[in-house]
Amino acid sequence: MYRRREVDRPGYPSLNADEEMEESLEEGVHYIWEVTPFEYVKENGRVVKVRYWQNEMVMEGRGRAKPVPKKDKVLEIKADYVIEATGQETDYSFMGEKYMRQLRLTPQGQPILDMYGMTSIPGVFSGGDSTNTNRDLISAVRDADISVVAFSGT
């Protein structure tokens, strides 16, 4: 789910934007463009749906169009998991003091990883925007693949 049009996505146009899109579609990613998610619906403590509004793209001057939610109609989609990719800085506060003392970070605040993506905390892996500078979807997927191989031992 992305608030803007496909042509407005981060990193587009770039040398690998079309390849990244093709590969993600081959992996089964389903994109919903021009929407604003605003609520997670939970049952028994688990997310089961995401509610969202369709956006209208409004031009303001010469820049790219601004997404404006049409709040008169609520849409929803079933979900088993929600992974937010909001382009923010990594927040490690959920780990607690004990693990924060074990987590080794670069001067830029990124976790230091082994070749499989494991942090200095045994069994804790990191990937995507928090660890690589590409900050693109295909790199995050690759990071997850490497971590799964390491964790499963295959």
Image (cartoon, rainbow, N blue to C red):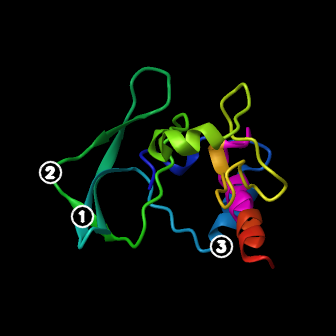
- Name the residue located 68 percent from the left edge and 36 percent from the top edge: 110
Name the residue carrying label 3.
Answer: 27
Q: Earlier in the sequence, mark 2 or mark 3?
A: 3
Q: Pointer 2 and pointer 1: residues touching (CB < 8 Å)?
A: no
Q: Pointer 3 and pointer 1: residues touching (CB < 8 Å)?
A: no
> Vertically, is 107 above or below 127?
above
Magenta stretch contains residue 108: no
Q: Is residue 146 left or right of residue 91?
A: right
Mark 2 vs mark 1, foreground winner is 1
Name the residue carrying label 2.
Answer: 72
- State which region is magenta: 131-144
The secondary element bearing badge 1 is classed as: strand
Q: Earlier in the sequence, mark 3 or mark 1?
A: 3
For the question of whether residue 68 can be seen, the reply is yes
Mark 3 vs mark 1, foreground winner is 1
Quarter containing the N terminus: bottom left
Q: Disc 1 marks which amino acid?
A: Val
For the question of whether residue 92 can be seen, the reply is no
**Near-viewer residue (85 or 96):** 96
- Name the residue located 61 percent from the left edge and 37 percent from the top edge: 101
Name the residue carrying label 1.
Answer: 41
Magenta stretch contains residue 135: yes
Q: Disc 3 marks which amino acid?
A: Glu
The CA distance from mark 2 to mark 3 is 34 Å
